[in-house]
Amino acid sequence: MAQEEPSEYGDIFSVIDKMYKILSEAKSGFMDQDLIKVSRSSLENLLDELKAALPTQLKSAVEIMRSADARMGQATAKAESTMRDAQAKAEKIVREAQERADYLSSEDSVARMASQKAGDMIAQAKAESAKILGEAASRAASLEDSADKYCLGCLNGLSSELKKLLATSQGGVASIEARQKQRFEKGAGK
């Protein structure tokens, strides 16, 4: 019997388990123990159930991919918003420093001191602006990296599940084709 799978694939594996049960309960041939009699309609009904269950699983895979794309879009939007906020804050700091410098330099009696102080304030504002922009860029890169890792994990999981489904269906096809070949060879040998 097949090993129990997660509930999202329960329909498919339930049908496969029923097929195994039919095969295990079938009566074997008199001369050949490997040759069995199986109800065609029972097996066809189970194959129809299997076909009906597959699109549900594929829809789940598409939903996982859409969710990963949405998360990536949200992370990118958040990173862009963080960069815009940091840029606006940096521009405000520089503008205020320049206004303060302009005010101080307009005073005749303290022109030199104001000029020196204004230069210091502008340099400090530029340094703080660079720091804020660096932090925002780092945060944006971190958000994008997290979104990429999530998307990659989802897609790798999806790929793994699809490979399992493909291997299971190919095994079933090979088994049925082998039985058909045996029946044909047995029929041709008569």
Image: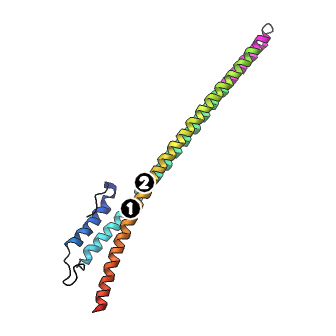
Residue flagged by tag 1: what amino acid is it?
Lys
101 on left or right of 85 = right
Q: Which quadrant of the structure image shows residue 175?
A: bottom left
157 on left or right of 94 = left
133 or 42, which lies in front?
A: 133
Q: Which numbered circle lies on residue 25? A: none
Q: Which numbered circle lies on residue 157? A: 2
Q: CA distance from mark 1 to mark 2?
A: 11 Å
In the rendered image, which residue does mark 1 sit on?
164
Q: In the rendered image of this protein, does residue 74 appear above or below residue 20? A: above
Residue flagged by tag 2: what amino acid is it?
Gly
Residues at marks 1 and 2 touching, judged by CB atoms closer than 8 Å: no
Q: Residue at x 31, y 83 (%)?
A: 182
Q: Residue at x 71, y 17 (%)?
A: 100
Color encoding of the figure = rainbow
Assign the N terminus to one quadrant of the image.
bottom left
Task: Say what secondary structure mark 2 lies in.
Answer: helix
Q: In the rendered image of this protein, does residue 51 appear above or below residue 27? A: above
The residue carrying pointer 1 sits among few (fewer than 14), some (14 to 19) or many (20 or more) residues within 10 Å by Cα, namely: few
Task: Say what secondary structure mark 1 lies in.
Answer: helix
Position of residue 83 measured from the top left corner of the image (x, y, whole percent): 60, 35
Residue at the outermost right position: 108
Q: In the rendered image of this protein, does residue 119 appear above or below residue 28? A: above
Assign the C terminus to one quadrant of the image.
bottom left
Which span is picked out in magenta?
A: 93-114
**Residue 159 lies within the magenta run:** no
